[in-house]
Amino acid sequence: MIRHIFRHSGSFAFEAGGSISNLEVVYHTSPYDYSPEKKVIWLCHALTASSDAEGEWWPALVGPGKTVDTEKYFVICANVLGSACGSSGPASTNPTTGKPYFFDFPKVTVHDTVRAFDLLREYLGIKKIDMVISTSMGGFMTFDWLAWKPELFETVFFIATGARVTPWLTGFNTAQRMALYADPTFKEHRDLKGGMDGLKAARTIALLTYRCEEGLFKQVEDSDDVMFADKAGAYYRHQSSKFVKSWDAYSYLSVCDQVDSNNVGRGRGGVENVLRNIKADCTFVCMSSDELFPPEDMKPWAEMVPGAKYIEIETPYGHDGFLTETDAIGHILAPALP
């Protein structure tokens, strides 16, 4: 997929207050310009993923000749606002100061990102999105977009996601924020390296929610002879140290805040009212051991949508199943991709 930058001229006002000029959205597409003759598949990514689905987070499913064929279809994935992966966010340069925005970047809601995506869609001339495939946080955007502009969408796949943030998920986000603010360098915001230790701790908290105990045991089983078990600890330290090479604490705070804004029913008569009025062909795909979006949450959402299908993938890998169970996901997607 090819990387592009969409620049919106003029001011972009945020739902929670504040505005910026010259909003940017980084996005990846199939290696050719959009044409109405091609079916459009829009991918909505997870919390800290980039817009490069083929190269970074779903290479088993996205690319030439693969399930989501970038030659057969016009495939597009846009990066959410507030991210460290290119779209406008706290790490962007504030034209007033010539430095990163840090805490001065407006708080981003799910609907802000969806509005940015829709501006990009209009810029590209896309009149209809034949299929949306959304994973984790990407599903938040899809629910909101579908509620806002239902006529755009034909087929939707919601994978390991939810229509409204739960107290369980908000609690984990709160713990991550506390970790960020516990690092005194975070509040100094002298440069984008501020809060690195806090970010490592916050990311470790997040990683604990991405796997269940069984999946982690399969990956980092300790020997029976050790005095102090540490393989799991080493795994988390490695993963968090790797993560901070490409992310900053200010952008991470922004996307965590965006997660807590997820509520498709806000201002629309409630979640059930929205879901019962969806006309698109929807499929909900749940990871059996997902602790963030468990079956007891996802199945009721699916039952509210007229004609929706609910499919549960048996996996020991928790929420990360949407990244690891690509064969199963491919079998689910393939019948809807002529």
Image (tube, rainbow, N blue to C red):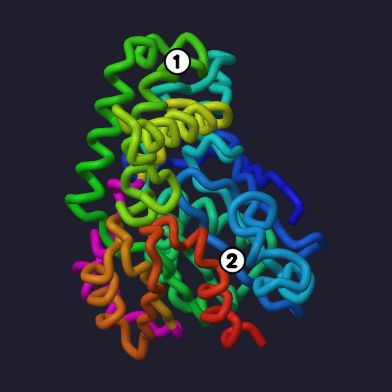
Q: Which residues are magenta?
A: 259-281
Residue 64 seen in render: yes
Name the kind of residue labelled 1 in the image. Answer: Gly
Image coordinates for residue 170, horizontal then vertical, percent: 23, 45
Image coordinates for residue 105, horizontal then vertical, percent: 43, 29
Question: Which quadrant does the N terminus fall into?
Answer: bottom right
Question: Which quadrant does the C terminus fall into?
Answer: bottom right
Foreground pick, 184 / 313: 313
Residue 106 seen in render: no
What SS does tag 2 mark? strand
Q: Quadrant of residue 53?
A: bottom right
Q: Which residue is mark 1?
A: 194
Tag 2 and tag 1, C-beta contact below 8 Å: no
Outermost residue, left direction? 167
- In the displayed structure image, the side of residue 76 where residue 111 appears, left or right: left
Q: Which residue is mark 2?
A: 42
Dominant SS in magenta? loop
